[in-house]
Amino acid sequence: MPADDAVVPAAAPSPDGTPAPDPTLLPDAILPGAHRRRACVVAMGGRTLAVDVRETREVMKLDVIGTVPGAPAPLLGVANLRGTVLAVADARSLLALAPKPSRPSTPSIVLATGGLEAAVPIDGVLGLEWFDEPLPADDVPDGPLKTFAAGLVPRPDGPAILLDAARLLEALRAPWAPAAPEAQP
């Protein structure tokens, strides 16, 4: 089966009007050109980055960021997402991108995977791209950004670096996460 084809259940129509057989018992039909994955493509620090939508909860505007006294970088604070307290963490330093202060109405992508969730400020959303499998990240220069690259998402105007959201969230959490489980009294 070609890589750009999707599998969907097939139901053969009955020419004599008898009920169609159970589609779960029939072979699958192939739709040419259908892609299996989708990425949210964003701009951050002059780079075009992408996150698999399965690891993205939503894109939101940060109107108010509550401060957390003594919070280590990269934690900027917390935000209210429909009644849920959400960490706001700046990934620019981890990705070796130029710093940019967060202002009211700063767009952020909410990453959620592996039991972790955080809003990460971005410069803007560029769109959604369908893809099958990411291309190898061989063209990403060695450095901090390559550490978080899961591959490249092809786009008409050049590939976007697909971020490994789980690895990024773990790295963002590391400065304030306990090194070992706390002892219970």
Image (tube, helix red, strand yellow):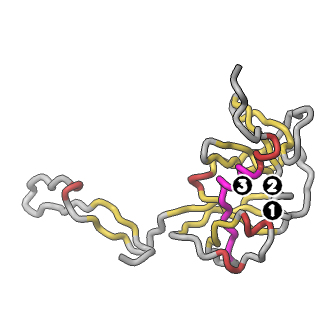
Identity, as a three-letter code, of the amino acid under mark 2: Ala
Crowd around label 2: few <14 · some 14–19 · many ≥20 (10 Å): many
Q: Is residue 31 magenta?
A: no
Q: How far separated are the C-alphas under marks 1 and 3?
A: 9 Å
Considering the numbered disc 3 on the image, is that residue within a helix, a strand or a loop?
helix
**What is the x, y in percent for residue 20?**
15, 55
Residue position marked by numbered label 3 in the rendering: 168
Considering the numbered disc 2 on the image, is that residue within a helix, a strand or a loop?
loop
**What is the x, y in percent for residue 41?**
68, 63
How many tags in the picture? 3
Answer whether labels 2 and 3 touch (C-beta < 8 Å): yes
**What is the x, y in percent for residue 18?**
8, 54
Q: Which mark is residue 95?
A: 1
What quarter of the picture does the N terminus occupy? Answer: bottom left
Q: How far separated are the C-alphas under marks 2 and 3?
A: 8 Å
Asked if residue 105 lies left or right of residue 12, the reply is right
Q: Please, is residue 58 above or below residue 46 in the view?
A: above
- Residue located at (72% from left, 39% from top): 180
Residue position marked by numbered label 2 in the rendering: 91
